[in-house]
Amino acid sequence: MTEKGEMIMTELEKLKKYLDDNGYDCEMLNHSDNPHYFSKPRNEPDQIIVYGPGHKRSWDVVCHDFSYGGPDGLLELYGDLCTDVIGWLTADDVIKIIENNKKNGGIPIDSMDDIKEDWYLW
């Protein structure tokens, strides 16, 4: 919460809101009791799975102790949007990747450099 009592959304929650608002078939999961994901239990969602036609898994993002960027609250993406894991992403970064994927006919990106204009480098 902020000093004014406003709720602060996590990057995962921001992305889930975008996906819901845009009609994506997706679910947010909490694996906080799984020791493979966390060094200490947390009571918050850690994964979004997005489904394509036929409710088949298309891509997902995770944010946990062992994901690329997870300890900093950032997202790791893998699946049909990219050819390899891409980490240290904000929700806005993932949204840009989604929008780019729509524009280019569904061709996955190799790295953030594929859509880089003013991207930061990590």
Image (cartoon, rainbow, N blue to C red):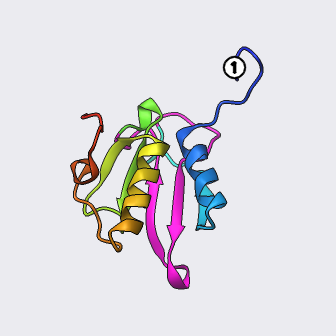
Q: Nearer the viewer, residue 38 or 101?
A: 101
Left or right of residue 60, residue 68 in this image: left
The magenta-colored residue range is 39-68
Q: Nearer the viewer, residue 87 or 81?
A: 81
Q: Position of residue 65 (x, y in %)?
A: 43, 37
Vertical relation: 53 (above or below) 76: below
Left or right of residue 110, residue 9 in this image: right
Vertical relation: 37 (above or below) 2: below
In the rendered image, the residue lying farthest to the bottom is 54
Question: Which residue is located at x 76 percent, y 17 percent?
Answer: 4
Q: Is residue 33 visible?
A: no
Q: Which residue is mark 1?
A: 2
In the rendered image, the residue lying farthest to the top is 3
Identify residue type, mark 1: Thr
Left or right of residue 6, residue 31 in this image: left
Question: Which residue is located at x 59 percent, y 67 percent?
Answer: 24
Q: Position of residue 49 (x, y in %)?
A: 52, 63
Secondary structure beneath disc 1? Answer: loop
Vertical relation: 62 (above or below) 60: above
Q: Nearer the viewer, residue 8 or 32?
A: 8
Q: Position of residue 54 (x, y in %)?
A: 54, 85
Where is the C terminus found, in terms of image quarters?
Answer: top left
Question: Is residue 55 within the magenta segment?
Answer: yes
Q: Is residue 59 visible?
A: yes
Question: Which residue is located at x 69 percent, y 19 percent?
Answer: 2
